Amino acid sequence: MGEPVRQSDRPAARAAAAWCVAAAFGTYFCVYAVRKPFTAGAFADDPFWGAGYKSALVVAQVLGYTASKFLGIKVVSEVSPARRAGLILALVGVAELALFLFAVTPAPWNVAWLFVNGLPLGMIFGLVLGVLEGRRQSEALAAGLCASFVVADGAAKSAGAYLLKAGVSEAWMPAAAGLLFAPALLLFVGMLARVPPPAQSDVALRSERAPMTAADRRAFGRRYAAGLLLLGGAYLLVTVLRSVRADFAPEVWAGLGVTGQPGVFTYSEMAVAACVLVLSGAAVLIRDNRRAFTYAMGTAAAGAVLLAAALVGLRAGVLSPLAFMVLHGVGLYLPYIAVHTTVFERLIAMTRDRGTVGYLMTLVDAFGYLGYVAVLLARSAGGGGPDFLAFFVPLSWVIAAATLALLLPAWYYFLSHPAARPAAGEA
């Protein structure tokens, strides 16, 4: 099962892990600067053939992002490690060019450029995650990566809001935010390119992660179809709620009575990240793959319960807006992050099957964002309403209950699957 790390090797191992986390966190944090700052704008002055202009922008980008996820099922699973860094930079370059064209194209025709902006970005997370998986410290490394999109979501909105306060127009603000982070992106992607492959001891503990062919993907899907449908359904639901919360955070905060405070986006998400990532990253301390998988599924189920508790506290009036958003975020992100950091990582290690976390994450993300598009279109067709909180709270209730109902049978399915039985020598 691999040799233990010698005492003399531990400082080097810690330094290598810190390098990996910094490279992955920094890369994806900077990617958010070409994706999310536009959501800090109101975009209330421009019509879109009778529909809300900001909603049209969000839908256009999400459509592009969703299409990118479906393209990424093939691209992410088949790309070789040597090509990842160059591909990340090329994809971000296309997304930033689309923001420049968005700024110079009159409204409402510039909505199309938000679709183009989203089209390359959906593949990047799987490419970054592919660098980190299959290692003894993968949960901790992936938790560091996930910290980027928890914190960066709020930071990108804050950056957009500050640019608007500084006098940058709403049309130019998204492109300006992306350019601000370009030097840092180059630095972090360069660091990512220098991360070494997993050691042989990592492979012995977690299994080899090689590029997958179309036949490999079909075989994996057939073997675990029922469990993947249950788990994918739960992930779809939390992706929908997480995306609504992220893209319409100003509207949610306004419904809670908080306006004119750009920093609140960052403060709340930093508190959420601190709680969730400690709980998710703790799975790295569990050597046995079955036990770690059980721990991850348990924290995911607990998240659905916490989400319901936040809604109860809001209705009872015992939670402040900040406390509600933090507790809501912790409950929402526990299942979301558990899938990213541990569930798929330990599923592959437990079954020793040919697969990669990057592929599985891109697969469930594709359907998750497709669900989000459906929710956005349904709300637009229904006319929406000025009180966004009246939409957000009932949606949260439905997703909390349905997520728990899907996670429990998925948990049982995978642990009882013949391929997941403990191997010889495992506890």
Image (cartoon, grey):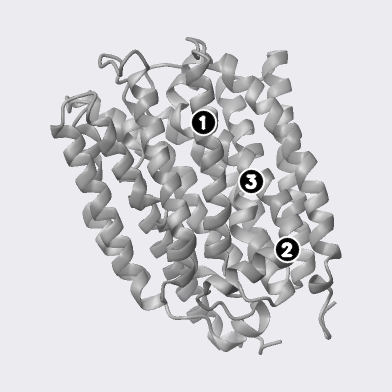
Expressed as whole percent of the image width and height from the top left, the position of residue 334 reads 65, 45
For marks 2 and 3, give the CA distance: 16 Å
Residue positioned 62% across, 40% down in the render: 238
The answer to whether one can see residue 418 in this image is: yes
Q: Residue at x 23, y 54 (%)?
A: 93
Q: Which amino acid does label 2 sit on?
A: Tyr
Q: Pointer 2 and pointer 1: residues touching (CB < 8 Å)?
A: no
2 vs 1, front mark: 2
Q: Separation of disc 3 and disc 1 at Cα?
A: 14 Å
Q: Which mark is residue 222?
A: none
Q: In this view, does 30 lie above or below 169?
A: below
Residue at (23, 31) in percent of width and height: 110
Is the residue under label 3 in contact with that under label 2 (CB below 8 Å)? no
Q: Which of marks 2 and 3 is nearer the N terminus?
A: 2
Q: Which of 69/128 is in front? A: 69
Residue 318, position in %: x, y?
A: 69, 17
Number of numbered markers: 3
Mark drawn on residue 244: 1
111 horizontally vs 398: left or right: left
Task: Give the residue type that dot 3 points to.
Answer: Tyr
> From the viewer's perspective, is residue 1 above or below residue 27?
below
Packing grade of label 1 (10 A; few <14, some 14-19, many >=20) is: some
Vertical order, 340 against 242 (above or below): below
Closer to the eye: label 2 or 3: 2
Residue flagged by tag 1: what amino acid is it?
Val
Q: SS for tag 3?
A: helix
Snapshot quadrant of residue 423: bottom right
Task: Kindly identify which numbered label has been placed on residue 224.
Answer: 2
Residue that label 3 marks: 235
Going by the picture, which residue comes out furthest to the top? 386
Where's residue 286, x and y in %?
73, 68
